[in-house]
Image (tube, rainbow, N blue to C red):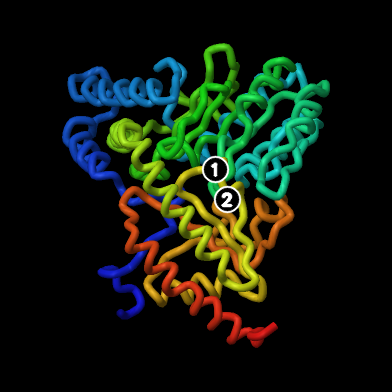
Amino acid sequence: MSEGSTSERAHLDNGGRAPWHPLARQAFLQAIDDGWADPRRLHSEGRRAARLLDGAREAVAAEIGARTEEVRFTATHTTALHHAVLGSAAARARVGADVVVGGTERAAVLHAAAGAAAARGGTRRVVPVDRAGRVDLDELRSAVGAPGVALAALQHANGEVGTRQPVVEAHEAARAAGVPLLVDAGASLGHDVVPGAWDLLAADPADWGSPAGVGVLAARQRVRLAATGPEEADPWAPGGVSVPAAFAAAVALQAVAADRSAEDARRRALTDRVRAEVARIPDVEVVGDPDDRLPHVVTFSFLYVDGEALVTELDRAGVAVGSGSACTASTLEPSHVLAAMGVLTHGNVRIALDRSTTEGHVDRLLAVLPGAVARVRDLLGVTGL
């Protein structure tokens, strides 16, 4: 099989950008015909597009346990996170300027939190995590209970290692302190049950098999958000939202929610097998909580292996995987998530199984991985260490 051939390839890098769900494709094409007009216009075509957009908001709201008016569409998931952090911090400037974050949050959250805090003379308070990637709840309670905190942010589950966070307990602590909690559900919504323990929530439709180019931002009615950019008719999506993308996102979310239990069991069995088989390879660390985790994500790191070289070697063998941090993968820098956990950061492989992933795709990974690791180690001159 030549490099680049797709007939037998196993694409296992579906975190953040999964193949379109068939119903997402169907909905997108329908909305191109019915929702191409500007939904802000008053003519028939505009009103038809507005109905599709309102229906999409209503459907997403139902899936996350929110009111329709609490759901907004943004340009991307990253934009939703930026709006949530910056808008909430700006709205609560009189209360304080500090922002509390978990140590394994996405780069988008970490950077926005640092900027929002620094702009008002505050600090970004990072709560440490254990070797599984779970925040220290006592440290979190202490951080959100301190004076001058504008916002706390904690992901529902980490998209790189799969570990779920104690968001229910975190929300209780934040509410007791009068601090809104932003929950990043970008890696979990569509794959896992996301509890309603949040004040702000961001999600990524591309992660559950919808078109890229749209994000979800939800804010409870009790939470204030201040627009932080130039004046716009829709400050959360300047210039407007892609109606076809939003409609496809809502339809796909309903579809994946309908078969989530079966998909959870199927993919969890596959990832359990990957974790067990990979652990047999010498000098490897399989990271993340083995049980309390997302059903479709596995990460492991190899000693004496360069991550970029291993990704390339697996690609030649017909297997696509991720490496480095899930949110800064293009740089292939050492993962800040793994570094925060205190685990091995180099020679990292991250896989995320889509609903279209088969047992045969996993068989292919497990068949070629030991040889790929051995070849990379041999190239680096570390065989036999």
Q: Is residue 244 left or right of residue 266?
A: left
At 52% from the left and 60% from the top, the residue drawn is 276
Kindly indicate whether the residue at mark 1 contacts the one at mark 2 (C-beta within 8 angstroms): yes
State the residue in front, 94 or 161: 161
Q: Amino acid at mark 2?
A: Val
Between tags 2 and 1, which lies in front?
Answer: 1
Q: Pinpoint residue 175: horizontal percent, then vertical percent.
A: 68, 17
At 66% from the left and 46% from the top, the residue drawn is 133
State the residue in front, 59 or 362: 362
Which residue sits furthest top?
A: 222
Q: Pinpoint residue 336: horizontal percent, then vertical percent.
A: 67, 53
Residue 136 position (above or below residue 71): below
Q: Which residue is mark 2?
A: 161
Q: Is residue 146 left or right of residue 23?
A: right
The residue tagged with tag 1: helix, strand or loop?
A: loop
State the residue in front, 298 or 307: 298
At 67% from the left and 24% from the top, the residue drawn is 90
Q: Which residue is mark 1?
A: 293
Q: Pinpoint residue 91: horizontal percent, then vertical percent.
A: 65, 20
Q: Is residue 181 left or right of residue 41?
A: right
